[in-house]
Every structure is written in structure tokens, then in C-alpha cells.
Amino acid sequence: MTFSFDLTGKTALVTGANTGLGQGIAVALAQAGAAIVAVGRSNMDETERLCREAGAAFHSVQADLSSLDPIERIVTEASTLSGRIDILVNNAGIIRRADAIEFTEKDWDDVMNVNLKSTFFLSQAVARTMIADERGGKIINIASLLSFQGGIRIPSYTASKSGLAGLTRLLACEWASKGINVNAIAPGYFVTNNTEALRNDPKRSSEILGRIPAGRWGDPADLGGAAVFLASTAADYIHGIVLPVDGGWLAR
Ligand code: NAD
């Protein structure tokens, strides 16, 4: 049996790749040889520079994933710019913090729309192309520890990420026979915009750090190995897993 982590000749579409975990994943996939199509609503210059420094081709598609409006355009533009989409990383996500007792409908809908609804329909649109040419592909969803745990003050985020774990399993079951591997990565606590409020709260910050067996917050580069692995032929028989990359948090 042969397997490889080499992604040369593959195109990876990564949502929310301008910063944080999406940028770390895009750069890792670029270092493994993939061409990158970065999708998001923000400037991608820094990610473009890092991917090109890794020797990868790079394109970007401007799109706001808070609605389904851009979904078909994203797939069309990405295919035109870079050819077939072989790897989809559903990374774009938002979080809203408030006590459950006063959480608003807007904070519910906004989070569910980006984290779950757009993720499903972009996966559907990309999977249709992967199934149409019978070459399959890899879909990697960025889940969370809140796919396993409850947390506090983030009801729509926990619902979206728990839902994403279930969706990962459903899509894996439906599409495994089509040659598409659908899996998820559950990052622990990483230093990004998403966790800024936690890191700025001395009490929460030291509580979190004190529970991480590795003794440090994650760096976006820490996700690279898991992303490359799940995107590669080494993971061809892996379907429907949610892989924690959490410094040991869930083992505690
Ligand atoms: P971040 O806020 O730095 O990045 C979020 C990304 O999503 C940005 O690129 C942003 O532009 C994009 N995005 C948000 N709304 C969008 C929209 N409407 N349209 C297009 N793009 C949009 O945070 P991050 O930590 O890098 O988050 C990336 C993913 O990782 C998210 O799904 C998040 O839930 C998940 N995650 C993060 C952590 C952590 O500790 N940082 C832990 C677990 C899961």
C-alpha cells in the first residue's frame, strides 16, 4: 500500500483564509504543494504572500458567507481560476457571546448562517462538482471543542459546532461511496481573533491555560499537520471523524 501527504497538483478552497486558523491551514496546504483559492470577505494579501512564499499558486474570491447568495459564484470562480476543486476547507466562522437568558435571535441567526448553513450549502455545491467528474475529493470542516462540550455564554456557537459534527458524519455517510472524504478538525484554544475576548479576561484566560495539558494556547500553524493529513491520500479510508487538535484538553 502506498500513501502520500503530497498535495502537488491539487487545488484547495479555504474559506476565511485571511487570518487565524484559515490562514494557518491555507499556508500548510500550500507548503504541501496545493494551489490555494482563498474565499472570504476580507483582504487576502498576507495569506497570498505566505502561500506564494511556499511556492504555491494563489487566487482569492471575495464572498460574504452570511448568506447563500455567493455559493454558486464561489464554485464557478474558483474552478475558472484554479481548475477542479479537490479539497474544501470550511473554516469561516463567527462567535457571539452573551448569557443564554438574554441571547438574541440575531446572534442566533448570524452564527448559524455562517457556521452551519453556508457550510452545508457550499459543501453541497462543491460535492456536486466532485461527484460529476467521478474524481471525489476531501472536505474538512473546522469544528470546535464545543462540538463535544457545552461551554458557557455562546449558545448559537455551541449549537452550530455540535451541529457541524453531526453534519460531518451525515455527509461522510452519504458521500463516502462517491470518493469524497468528509471529516472535521476540532481545534482547542488557539490564539486568533475568535478567542481575543477570552485571552483579555485574566480569570478566564488563566483557567483555560491551566486546563491545557500542553501548557500553552495553540498557534494556527499547529493545525497544519492535521489539515494536510486529512486532505491527502493518507486519509483515503477515513470518513466522518472529528479530530481534536487541542493540546490534550479533551483528555483531561
Ligand atoms: P477569526 O475570527 O480570526 O477568523 C474567522 C474567519 O472567518 C475570518 O477569516 C473571517 O473573515 C471569516 N468569516 C467570518 N464571517 C464571514 C462571512 N460572513 N463571510 C466570509 N468569511 C467570514 O477566528 P479563527 O479562530 O481563525 O476561526 C476560524 C474557525 O476556527 C472558525 O470556524 C472558528 O469557529 C474555529 N475555531 C476557532 C478556535 C480558536 O480557538 N481560535 C477554536 C475552535 C474552532
Image: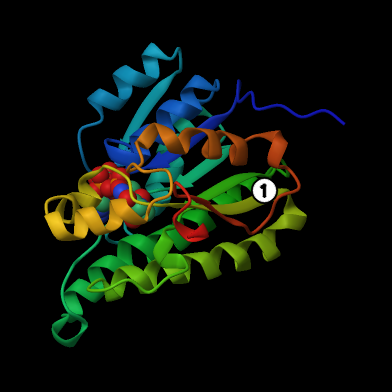
Amino acid of disc 1: Ala
Q: Looking at the image, which is closer to me, 25 or 109?
A: 25
Residue appearing at x 53%, y 30% in the figure:
11
The image position of residue 46, as x and y in percent, is 25, 24
| Residue count near mark 1 (Cα–Cα under 10 Å), binned few <14, some 14–19, many ≥20 | few
Q: Residue at x 61, y 41 (%)?
A: 230
Residues 58 and 27: in front is 27
Which residue position is annotated with label 1? 132
Q: Position of residue 207 (x, y in %)?
A: 25, 59
Q: Is residue 219 left or right of residue 196?
A: right
Residue furthest to the right in view is: 1
Residue located at (45% from left, 46% from top): 247
Q: Is mark 1 within 8 Å of ligand 1?
A: no
Q: Secondary structure at mark 1?
A: helix
Residue 120 in the image: x percent, y percent?
A: 47, 62
Q: Is residue 74 above or below residue 12?
A: below
